[in-house]
């Protein structure tokens, strides 16, 4: 676990340690455990209220869910590019890719806010319908994690801007991108459960 990673001038790295730091992995484990429990709650409520869940996806604005999926996947790609750039000792590109990742997070939040407004206008509220209640429970929780991820990205952008990271030492940048990928992963499960599966 404590083995060092050797970074080469071409940006490649020898595997030999867990990326990021222990703290971020504790956070990711907590996040994924939380979502696993929410997915179990989803299954429980679906088994008890199948009609709500059968009609549920048709009540939602699928285009908003698709748009947010594209945004999350794109921003996840940008996060990978940021990590590759810092491994090549290209801090400027790493910072720019991180800014792109952050803009993806902000776009996700804006789309979700617009979707919630659309839901309210169309009567999709969390009273008397188990699917709608589960929809808000899952998406609000995910929204909080996106906000936390954005705050981590801002921190990584500032540290990159001021030269805190190098090919040999960029655990903080790795941690920010790892957390972003965990949030991405949660959305990839949430999207089909809410917008597709009946």
Image (spheres, helix red, strand yellow):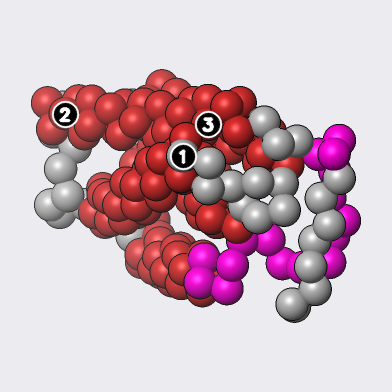
Q: Are marks 1 and 2 in contact (CB under 8 Å)?
A: no
Q: Is 154 on the left or on the right of 24, as rendered?
A: left
Residue 34 appears at what percent x and percent y?
A: 42, 69
> Start and end of the magenta stretch?
9-24
Which residue corresponds to mark 1?
A: 162
> Which quadrant of the figure has residue 171?
bottom right
Residue 195 appears at what percent x and percent y?
A: 44, 37
Q: Main secondary structure of the magenta part?
A: loop
Nearer the N terminus, badge 3 or badge 2? 3
Of residue 113 and residue 44, the one placed in the foreground of this image is: 113
- Residue occupying image coordinates x 59% and y 67%: 21
Of residue 20 and residue 162, the one placed in the foreground of this image is: 162
Q: Secondary structure at mark 3?
A: helix
Q: How far apart are the alpha carbons under marks 3 and 2? A: 33 Å
Which residue corresponds to mark 2?
A: 117
Residue 21 falls within the magenta-colored stretch = yes
Which residue corresponds to mark 3?
A: 95
Q: How far apart are the alpha carbons under marks 1 and 3? A: 10 Å
């Amino acid at each position: 676990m404590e083995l060092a990673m050797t970074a080469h001038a071409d940006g490649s790295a020898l595997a030999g340690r867990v990326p990021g730091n222990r703290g971020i992995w504790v956070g990711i484990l907590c996040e994924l455990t939380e979502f696993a429990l929410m997915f179990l709650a989803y299954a429980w409520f679906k088994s008890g209220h199948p009609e709500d869940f059968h009609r549920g996806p048709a009540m939602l604005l699928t285009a908003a869910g698709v748009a947010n999926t594209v945004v999350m996947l794109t921003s996840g790609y940008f996060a990978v590019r940021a990590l590759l750039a810092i491994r090549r000792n290209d801090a400027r590109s790493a910072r720019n890719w991180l800014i792109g990742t952050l803009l993806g997070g902000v776009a996700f939040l804006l789309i979700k806010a617009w979707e919630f407004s659309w839901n309210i206008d169309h009567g999709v509220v969390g009273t008397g319908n188990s699917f709608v209640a589960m929809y808000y429970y899952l998406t609000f929780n995910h929204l909080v994690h996106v906000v936390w991820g954005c705050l981590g990205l801002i921190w990584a952008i500032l540290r990159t801007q001021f030269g805190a990271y190098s090919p040999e030492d960029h655990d903080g940048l790795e941690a920010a991108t790892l957390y972003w990928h965990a949030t991405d992963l949660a959305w990839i499960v949430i999207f089909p459960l809410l917008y597709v599966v009946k």
